[in-house]
Structure formats: C-alpha cells, structure tokens
C-alpha cells in the first residue's frame, strides 16, 4: 500500500517513537544532492573501521549548522543491478546518527 506524505502526516499518531510510519521511514534511503556526507541510522551497516565520536560532526542544515552523529565509518549496502543481480555498495566516512529519520546517500559520494 502506498501512502502519500500528506496522508501520513494526517494519520500520524502522537507517540512518534512507537509509530509504524516512523519505523518504515527509518529503513528508507534518500539520495541527497545537497548532502556532503552519507548518513545511516543503522549501526549494523558499519564495518570494523567504525569509531565513536564524542561531540558529533558539524554539518550545515536548513536550520543552520548542527552537531550530528555518534560515530563514523564505512557502511555496506546490498543493492540490485539493473539486470537483477545483487551487488554491494560501500560508502566510506559515513556518519552514524541513530536520531536520523531516514538514511541519506550523498550523491557526491557515489
């Protein structure tokens, strides 16, 4: 079932942390041409080079500069080629931010 964003906002429950809609969003990937870094909210995607950050990383946002992230490292994503065969994509220096509503692929990192 496809839900348009405007419908999702109307139906969104008060407790967002337990929302099925929010849970589904956290698993989605958004390609962002304006993002300087790839950001993932899933720690399981990070490899052995993951390192924790005490204060996060400063990134420019629509609201100004913000400290984001709890760590940094290389992530590995299983994808599908146009012919349907599987492939693995790696993004170095990706930011781990468990508070991110969606995962973001920086177009510049591709």
Image: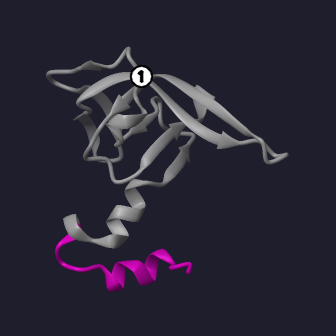
Asked whether 59 or 64 is in front, the reply is 59
Q: Position of residue 46 (x, y in %)?
A: 40, 28
Q: Position of residue 20 (x, y in %)?
A: 33, 71
- Rendered-image quadrant of the C terminus: top right
Q: Is residue 61 above or below residue 19?
A: above
Mark 1 packing: few (<14 Cα in 10 Å), some, or many (20+)? some
Total of numbered circles in the picture? 1
Q: Residue at x 48, y 36 (%)?
A: 35
* Left/right of residue 56 with respect to residue 24 in the rendered view: left
Residue 25 in which image quadrant: bottom left
Q: Is residue 18 above or below residue 42?
A: below
Asked if the stretch drawn in magenta spans residue 12, the answer is yes
What residue is pinned by disc 1? Answer: 47
Q: Position of residue 101 (x, y in %)?
A: 34, 54
Residue 109 in which image quadrant: top right
Q: How is the image coloured?
A: one colour
Q: Is residue 55 above or below residue 42?
A: above
Residue lying at the far top of the rendered structure = 49
Q: Residue at x 56, y 78 (%)?
A: 2
* Left/right of residue 47 with respect to residue 88 in the rendered view: left
Asked if the stretch drawn in magenta spans residue 13, the answer is yes
Q: Residue at x 36, y 78 (%)?
A: 9
Residue 85 in which image quadrant: top right
- Rendered-image quadrant of the N terminus: bottom right
Mark 1 secondary-structure assignment: loop
Residue lying at the far right of the rendered structure = 83
Q: Residue at x 34, y 63 (%)?
A: 23
Asked whether 6 or 80 is in front, the reply is 80
Q: Which residues are magenta?
A: 1-16
């Amino acid at each position: 079932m496809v839900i348009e964003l405007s419908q999702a906002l109307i139906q969104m429950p008060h407790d967002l942390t337990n929302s099925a809609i929010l849970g589904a969003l956290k698993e989605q990937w958004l390609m962002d041409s304006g993002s300087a870094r790839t950001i993932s909210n899933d720690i399981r995607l990070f490899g052995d080079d993951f390192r924790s950050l005490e204060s996060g990383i400063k990134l420019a946002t629509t609201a100004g500069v913000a400290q984001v992230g709890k760590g940094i490292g290389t992530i590995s994503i299983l994808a599908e080629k146009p012919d349907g065969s599987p492939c693995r994509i790696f993004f170095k220096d990706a930011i781990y931010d468990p508070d991110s509503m969606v995962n973001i692929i920086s177009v510049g990192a591709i």
